[in-house]
Image: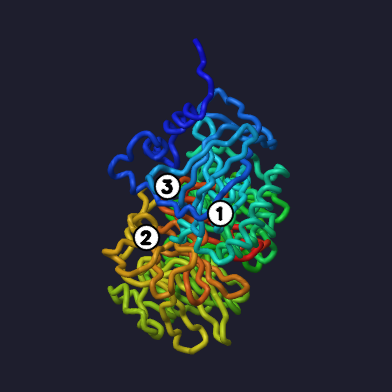
């Protein structure tokens, strides 16, 4: 069979059969001999022809077949891309065209050089180079009037594709960033160094591989390249964050639902599934040990929060009728031990008549000897103090010296009484779960995740009347419930439905959501950093949010159905986010309800 010679017309014909960003370019855009069919103008922008544009295209030196679908790239060398089709588009993939409606395009010469004698000026331009096997190189610039030089290679491709995606996330044009002229050239140079050093493997340049390329890029710089991370923050106005995985040591089939890090850097992870519970401790040296295992026969139906204190690990699990469990951290776990004889039953719920008060401690906080517990079964927040001598009753349970309901009221069927500040037992909660203590302005506050009311509430422990107020959240039932098998239906393309939240802004906008417009779906654990910023496990939105006192930001997670990923945290899928905790290095650990591993959000460079 005779192989036809490679000619410009053959290359153009080949290009027309390729998919560009998921859609084939209209043939007439490149064919000056065929009239432009009606309707194709929507794919074009007419160039003002106020600039010229030229440069060198360099691509991967080697394409090695993997005997499967597509190709993999091998090696760091790049060589001139000869006889490659080059065309110009806007960031939204519309083609720049001449006054005849035909797309501006050219071919590189034998040395990989291209030239446009007429090109748009003063507008964002993506220079796209088609390679074989539906792969492409791109670069981004805003040409000035007159002559412009721009070289396209793998580094420009990686930086431009990441930048284009971040602009989409913010609902902006790539030209809308004030620091663009100063920062993007620096970013491209540092990206090229990243590739040359081998820190980032040479990416697959296929159109369908672009999301994987972006994740690989953040993996390459997010943990240890502060200069590149800082440059992106100066350009975007926020920092791209790396999310990866941490081994929690849990048995296969268990889902990480609760985490806690003590003052010595020990990590405690509670895994749960099908009424089986396992709590493991990961020591700072990386070794693991079991704290307890509760088989299905022991009837554990959930695991809440954990608190390591004075040699005990206090855990919110059902104790039959009241209180919580404390596990002796000095006692080694053996395979013969069962759940109930490896723990101390803290029977804390007693009234003034000596009668047991039924409640279940979902989560615990402690200050100056006083335990605070969120009772999810009675919609109350309770406080109790244990006897200093660890007195035990006839059943071997430690009993409480005092017990008090400080907020909420089980006798009232109402589960919400408004967001206005309300004192003590006149406040109403609906399935309160997690608790966090925080001091501010000479006051001690107890933050409560009012989960079925979709709110974060705050109790003042210092004012004598336990005033409760809403800090974040609004509406009742404004977000549909979801779980690991049925994603929540609250979001439509990353936005709150206008029918439910008229006028509210995007949930994931990187510039944040105003406090009074921030919506939550079954929030759980909150924690604070050293600057007083609040981090929230927004469980059924499957996101980690951050509140700086003015706005709420999404730091990790994206729309339901997006697979888990290691890389760009704002494009990584999460499961039900039930618990979060800072590790010893200041990074945020996330209990992802879909996995027996933890996710780690790298915050070492800041936000």
Residue 534, disc: none
Instruction: Residue 250: give x, y in percent of width and height.
Output: 57, 47
Q: Quadrant of the C terminus?
A: bottom right
Q: Give the spatial CA distance, label 1 vs label 2.
A: 30 Å
**Residue lying farthest to the top in this orientation:** 1
Taking the image as shown, residue 349 lies to the left or right of residue 64, namely left
Label 2: which secondary element: loop
Instruction: Residue 599: give x, y in percent of width and height.
Output: 56, 53
Disc on the earlier residue, 1 or 2? 1
Residue at 68 percent across and 52 percent down: it is 189
Q: Would you name the residue on which mark 2 appears?
A: 495
158 lies above or below 455: above
Question: Of residues 94 and 262, which is closer to you in this image?
Answer: 94
For label 2, the crowd category at 10 Å Cα-Cα, with few meaning under 14, some 14 to 19 and many 20 or more, is some
Disc on the earlier residue, 2 or 3? 3
Question: Of residues 161 and 450, which is closer to you in this image?
Answer: 161
**Residue lying farthest to the bottom in this orientation:** 464
Question: Of residues 23 and 332, which is closer to you in this image?
Answer: 23
| Mark 1 in CB contact with mark 2 (< 8 angstroms) | no
For marks 1 and 3, give the one nearer the viewer. 3
For label 1, the crowd category at 10 Å Cα-Cα, with few meaning under 14, some 14 to 19 and many 20 or more, is many
Instruction: Residue 137: give x, y in percent of width and height.
Output: 56, 41
Disc on the earlier residue, 1 or 3? 3
Instruction: Residue 242: give x, y in percent of width and height.
Output: 59, 54
Query: Taking the image as drawn, is residue 375 in sight?
Result: no
Q: Give the spatial CA distance, label 2 vs label 3.
A: 37 Å
Q: Would you name the residue on which mark 1 appears?
A: 141
Q: Would you name the residue on which mark 3 appears?
A: 98
Query: Taking the image as drawn, is residue 143 in sight?
Result: yes
13 lies above or below 258: above
Label 3: which secondary element: loop
């Amino acid at each position: 069979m005779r192989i036809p010679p490679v000619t410009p017309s053959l290359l153009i014909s080949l290009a027309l059969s390729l998919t560009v960003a998921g859609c084939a370019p209209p043939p007439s855009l490149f064919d000056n001999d065929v009239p432009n069919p009606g309707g194709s103008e929507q794919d074009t922008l007419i160039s003002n022809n106020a600039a010229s544009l030229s440069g060198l295209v360099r691509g991967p030196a080697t394409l090695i077949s993997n005997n499967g679908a597509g190709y993999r790239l091998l090696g760091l060398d790049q060589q001139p891309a000869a006889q490659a089709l080059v065309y110009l588009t806007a960031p939204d993939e519309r083609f720049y065209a001449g006054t005849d409606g035909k797309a501006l395009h050219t071919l590189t010469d034998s040395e990989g050089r291209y030239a446009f004698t007429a090109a748009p000026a003063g507008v964002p331009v993506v220079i796209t180079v088609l390679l074989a096997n539906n792969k492409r190189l791109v670069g981004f610039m805003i040409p000035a009037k007159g002559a412009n030089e721009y070289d396209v290679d793998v580094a420009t491709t990686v930086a431009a594709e990441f930048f284009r995606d971040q602009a989409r996330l913010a609902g902006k044009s790539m030209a809308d960033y004030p620091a663009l002229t100063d920062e993007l050239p620096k970013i491209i140079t540092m990206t090229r160094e990243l590739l040359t050093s081998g820190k980032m493997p040479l990416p697959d340049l296929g159109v369908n591989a672009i999301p994987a390329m972006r994740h690989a890029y953040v993996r390459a710089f997010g943990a240890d390249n502060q200069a590149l991370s800082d440059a992106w923050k100066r350009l975007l106005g926020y920092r791209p964050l790396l999310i990866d995985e941490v081994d929690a040591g849990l048995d296969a089939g268990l889902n990480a639902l609760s985490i806690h890090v003590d003052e010595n850097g020990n990590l405690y992870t509670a895994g749960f599934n099908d009424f089986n519970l396992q709590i493991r401790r990961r020591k700072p040296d990386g070794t693991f040990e079991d704290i307890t295992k509760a088989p299905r026969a022991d009837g554990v139906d959930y695991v809440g929060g954990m608190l390591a204190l004075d040699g005990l690990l206090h855990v919110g699990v059902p104790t039959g009728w009241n209180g919580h469990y404390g596990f002796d951290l000095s006692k080694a776990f053996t395979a013969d031990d069962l759940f109930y004889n490896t723990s101390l039953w803290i029977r804390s719920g007693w009234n003034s008549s000596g009668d047991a008060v039924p409640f279940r401690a979902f989560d615990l906080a402690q200050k100056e000897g006083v335990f605070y517990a969120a009772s999810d079964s009675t919609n109350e927040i309770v406080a109790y103090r244990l006897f200093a001598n660890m007195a035990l009753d006839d059943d071997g349970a430690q009993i409480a010296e005092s017990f008090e309901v400080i907020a909420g009221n089980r006798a009232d069927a109402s589960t919400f009484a408004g967001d206005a500040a309300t004192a003590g037992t006149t406040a109403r909660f609906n399935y309160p779960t997690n608790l966090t203590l925080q001091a501010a302005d000479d006051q001690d506050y107890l933050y409560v995740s009012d989960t079925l009311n979709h709110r974060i509430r705050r109790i003042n422990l210092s004012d004598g009347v336990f005033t409760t107020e809403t800090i974040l959240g609004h509406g009742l039932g404004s977000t549909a419930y979801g779980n690991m098998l049925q994603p929540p239906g609250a979001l439509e393309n990353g936005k709150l439905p206008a029918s439910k939240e008229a006028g509210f802004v995007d949930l994931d906008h990187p510039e944040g959501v105003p406090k009074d417009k921030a919506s939550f779906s079954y929030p759980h654990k909150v924690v604070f950093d050293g600057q007083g910023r609040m981090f929230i496990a927004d469980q059924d939105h499957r996101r980690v949010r951050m509140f700086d006192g003015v706005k709420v930001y999404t730091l990790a997670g994206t729309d339901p159905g997006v697979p888990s990923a290691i890389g760009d945290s704002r494009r990584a899928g999460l499961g039900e986010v039930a618990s979060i905790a800072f590790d010893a290095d200041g990074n945020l650990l996330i209990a992802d309800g879909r996995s027996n591993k933890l996710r780690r959000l790298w915050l070492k460079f800041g936000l």
